[in-house]
Image (tube, rainbow, N blue to C red):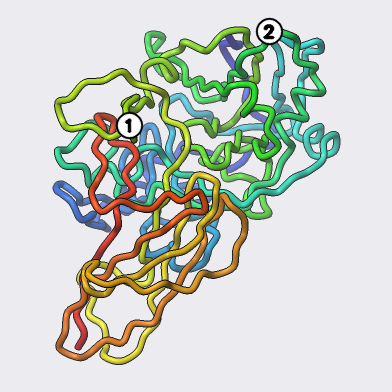
Amino acid sequence: MRRSSFLIGGAAVSGLATLSARSRALAQETITEPFANGARPLGSFPQKRPLIVLTSRPPQLETPFRLFNEGVFTPNDAFFVRWHLAGIPTKVDGRAFRIKVHGLVDNELALSIDDLRRGFEPVEIPAVCQCSGNSRGFFNPRVPGGQWANGAMGNARWRGARLGDVLKRAGVKAGAVQVRFNGLEMPVLPTTPDFIKALDMDLATSPDVIVAYEMNGGNLPLLNGFPVRLVVPGYFATYWVKMLDDIEVIAAADQNFWMKTAYRIPAVGDGCIQPGQTTPTTPITKMRVRSFITSLADGDKISGGRRRVQGIAFDGGSGIARVDFSSDGGATWTQAALGADYGKYSFRQWSVALDAQAGRSYHLACRATAHDGAVQPATACWTPGGYLRNIIESLSVSAG
């Protein structure tokens, strides 16, 4: 399905050879997530500020949640990192890099980064990239997989060429069913399945799916997929293939491990089941509506008086219609003010005034409603893979 090796060298971005050493240097600086066995080291990686380290090989790095209060867009050096396989290039020559477009096409292509920049109409889409397993650490009963808190997500302005325009240039033949994507990430052992994802033709050719070569106005960091990555707005990040170098149009639904076996949810109702229940499954796709308080953390001590509480909300592409706020654990709700609208795939900030009385404790909660009518539930969704959590988030503070 792809060539077996790639020559890396020349004009390189920051290397990853020092990952382990730099992680150990910060090993004594830790952060504790609010669930069992939640102690995590902070690690300093190339092109990144210190992030929470789940694993260093492959790199899985979480954004400390306080950083989401700094603005609606997540800085490149604070953006979370999730790789599936340990065979990641330590250098990539952007000048020599090519994306092969092949399969059921009239004209095979080998596109350089300059080809993408100059040969196709550039588009910019603000969009949230969220790991499918974001918030998995809060599942009860717990499930296998990376025990993320809520920081395996980020919002950026992605700039690139429409995938549909690339496919049009290649000329898709009749009988095409899906488009399959591969990147430079490789397994260490030959028995490990290569990381490959696929999209149905109607989604692959939709105007919002892009091959991105910029992130927040600059090159993508190496750990976030330099030189290009697939951006599928509204969908979980499992489809956002990094270091994308292979696009193949295929005549049948892809049956590789990462589509047929991994990243699947129960194919019943809303996808939520009871622990121990077994059901048929379907691939995970679009994100669900979520909101968070970002200006305060659980257990904070605040001063009495009037203060502004703020946060973020997003969904899978209909956009945020409203956010409600409660200071009494959900007994009563007040509609929050929404911030600027950067598009239906972006974080949307919200804020509300809280009149805090000294000596009192407050149980704060936020609840988002999307334009498609979806509302955050009061009870948590449970899935065997630790996916789809979008429960109403809450925290407690006390006023001094």
Picture residue at 38% right of the left edge, 67% below the top: 324
Picture residue at 65% right of the left edge, 15% below the top: 248
Residue 220 place in picture, x, y as percent: 61, 44
Q: Which mark is residue 175?
A: 2
Give the CA distance from mark 1 to mark 2: 32 Å
Residue 83 place in picture, x, y as percent: 43, 33
Q: Amino acid at mark 2?
A: Gly
Badge 2: few (under 14), some or many (20 or more) residues near its Cα, within 10 Å? few
Tell me if residue 57 comes above or below residue 389 in the rendering.
Answer: above
Position of the N terminus by quadrant: top right
Tell me if residue 47 comes above or below residue 173 in the rendering.
Answer: below
Nearer-the-camera pick, 149 or 22 = 149
Pick whichever of labels 1 and 2 is earlier in the sequence. 2
Q: Amino acid at mark 1?
A: Gly
Residue 258 in which image quadrant: top left
Picture residue at 36% right of the left edge, 74% below the top: 334
332 left or right, relative to 340: left
State how many labels appear: 2
Instruction: Give the structural element (helix, strand or loop) at label 1.
Output: loop
Nearer-the-camera pick, 34 or 268 = 268
Residue 400 in which image quadrant: bottom left
Tell me if residue 356 comes above or below residue 255 in the rendering.
Answer: below
Please say if the residues under marks 1 and 2 sit with CB atoms less than 8 Å apart.
no
Residue 298 place in picture, x, y as percent: 23, 67
Mark in the foreground, 1 or 2: 1
Most distant residue in the front direction: 373
Badge 1: few (under 14), some or many (20 or more) residues near its Cα, within 10 Å? few
Tell me if residue 55 comes above or below residue 364 in the rendering.
Answer: above
Residue 162 place in picture, x, y as percent: 73, 35
Is residue 303 in view from this perspective? yes
Picture residue at 53% right of the left edge, 39% below the top: 15
Residue on which disc 1 sits: 269
